[in-house]
Amino acid sequence: MKKPPATTPPPAGANQLSRRNFLKLGLGALGALAILETGGASLLFLQPRAAAGEFGGVVTAGASDSFPAGSVTEFPDGRFFLVRAPDGGFLAVYRRCTHLGCSVSWQPAENRFFCPCHASTFDLHGNVTNPPAPRALDTFPVTIEAGQVRVNTTRPDTRDNFTPDQLAYET
């Protein structure tokens, strides 16, 4: 019968981490950190970003009597123009061109909206006066509560042309 070999004590420093195991541990920790950061960034991306008074929510434009009849006021944070029609009605016109989505600007001297990308123009109510835009500018719902004009920018309303029933009046 053979005797089992005598066990020898481990060499000094055997409890120390080898270089290979250290690298495995370090790369594993970095991988876990990358997964956590990606998950956190994804959650932040999916959260609604609409702040009060900005695009994607309800914007309080101001007191209804502070907008003179026939005026156009830009709200850059809300991404719309508030039009006060000559008869006193309100219309919130989205500033995106219906052709390719460029930002339109209001030209008071010509009394029109102008798209710099392909020279589409729109009248005071957002109707196309010079193509290539295929339809009128989109609008946002307007409500007037306690003398304050509020514009709901959560979803634009598409339309082909302006009709008087699109105007909001103070009741």
Image: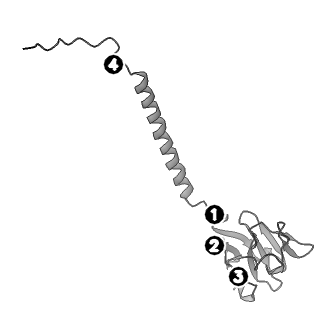
Q: Which quadrant: the C terminus?
A: bottom right
Density class for disc 4 (Cα within 10 Å; few <14, some 14-19, many ≥20) is few
Of the two numbered discs 1 and 3 on the same chain, state the one appearing first in sequence. 1
Residue picked out by circle 4: 15
Of the two numbered discs 4 and 1 on the same chain, state the one appearing first in sequence. 4
Residue picked out by circle 2: 155
Residue picked out by circle 3: 159
The answer to whether residue 37 is visible is yes
Inter-mark Cα distance, 3 to 2: 13 Å
Q: Nearer the viewer, mark 1 or mark 3?
A: 3
Where residue 11 sits, quadrant-wise, is top left
- The residue drawn where x is 53% and y is 53% is 42
Which residue ends up furthest to the right in the rendered image?
A: 109
Asked if the residue under mark 1 is in contact with the one under mark 2, i.e. CB atoms within 8 Å, the reply is no
Q: Is residue 125 above or below residue 80?
A: below
Asked if the residue under mark 3 is in contact with the one under mark 1, i.e. CB atoms within 8 Å, the reply is no
The answer to whether residue 123 is visible is no
Q: Nearer the viewer, residue 67 or 130?
A: 130
Amino acid type shown at disc 2: Arg
- The residue drawn where x is 80% and y is 68% is 104
Helix, strand or loop for disc 1: loop
Q: Is residue 42 above or below residue 15?
A: below
